[in-house]
Image (cartoon, rainbow, N blue to C red):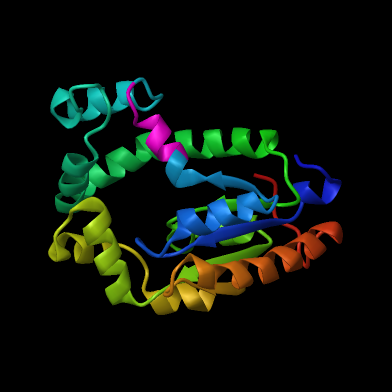
């Protein structure tokens, strides 16, 4: 579970809206010795060619929702589930149990000073907040989220706003946070914020944190 027994009991849930920079922040914590489990990366692996979710997705949605190389067509599926709540529930019923299982497995394998779970919909899930010791929110202005996702994914502003509308509000995330990292000024501005929190989390991990998370 980690290099110390405390790593098994102290954990951080890292979240933020789309385009906030969760992956970058998670990678920077990993570079400092944290054990990072990214549930979004797990979801991508499950829906990649040969991924464990592909057979069920093919059965539920058909070949038209797969790319020529056998991955889930994320763009097509995104539009479909936005337009059809029943399809969204069906996709979630396939992915969520697999993501949870893979997350549990990854948490049991990783080595690090403490664990960070990167969970895009941590606040929305209703359960993750009770499963981690602290919640860390990566925050930035909504207009910056829009620009980042448009540039990164090639989506229209309307498409990005539709995705953002399915997530909790910026204020709701901040209200749920124990700690906040502001990501509005490049990587250099993140370094001191992450150094400060890494020192705090390392200290808390040595004393089992301020509260104990439930076992995954």
Magenta region includes residue 43: yes
Residue 3 placed where, x, y %? Answer: 81, 42
Residue displayed at 19% across by 43% down: 75
Quarter of the image where the N terminus is located:
top right
Find residue 55 and report its image quarter: top left
Along the viewing direction, whichever of 124 and 153 lies nearer the viewer:
153
**Viewer-nearest residue: 128 or 11:** 11
Residue 33 visible in the picture: yes
x and y percent of residue 104 in the render?
A: 61, 37
Residue 145 figure quarter: bottom left
Residue at 23%, 28% in the rendered image = 60
Q: Nearer the viewer, residue 158 or 53?
A: 158
Q: Residue at x 20, y 41 (%)?
A: 77
Q: Is residue 187 left or right of residue 4?
A: left
Q: Main secondary structure of the magenta part?
A: helix
State yes or no: residue 76 in magenta. Answer: no
- Residue 154 sits above or below residue 201 on the image: above
Q: Is residue 135 left or right of residue 42?
A: right
Given residues 152 and 132, the one toward you in this image is 152
* Residue 21: quarter of image: bottom left
**Residue 165 in view here:** no
User: Residue at the front extreme?
Assistant: 188
Q: Position of residue 175 (x, y in %)?
A: 51, 78
Q: Which residues are magenta?
A: 42-49
Q: Quadrant of the C terminus?
A: top right
Which residue is drawn at the image coordinates 32% and 23% (left, top)? 49
């Amino acid at each position: 579970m980690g290099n110390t027994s405390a790593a098994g009991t102290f954990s951080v849930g890292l979240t933020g809206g789309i385009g906030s920079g969760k992956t970058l922040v998670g990678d920077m914590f990993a570079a400092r010795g944290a054990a990072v489990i990214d549930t979004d990366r797990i979801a991508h692996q499950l829906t990649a060619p040969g991924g464990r979710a592909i057979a069920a997705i093919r059965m539920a949605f058909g070949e038209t929702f797969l790319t020529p190389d056998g991955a889930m067509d994320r763009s097509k599926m995104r539009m479909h589930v936005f337009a059809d709540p029943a399809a969204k529930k069906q996709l979630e019923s396939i992915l969520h149990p697999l993501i949870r299982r893979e997350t549990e497995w990854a948490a049991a394998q990783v080595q690090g000073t403490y664990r960070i779970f990167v969970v895009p919909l941590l606040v929305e899930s209703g359960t993750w907040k009770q499963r981690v010791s602290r919640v860390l929110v990566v925050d930035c202005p909504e207009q910056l989220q829009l620009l980042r996702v448009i540039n990164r994914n090639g989506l229209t502003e309307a498409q990005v706003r539709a995705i953002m509308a399915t997530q909790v509000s910026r204020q709701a995330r901040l209200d749920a946070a124990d700690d906040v990292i502001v990501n509005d000024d490049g990587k250099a501005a993140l370094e001191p914020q992450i150094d400060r929190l890494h020192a705090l989390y390392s200290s808390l991990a040595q004393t089992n944190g301020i509260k104990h998370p439930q076992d995954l």
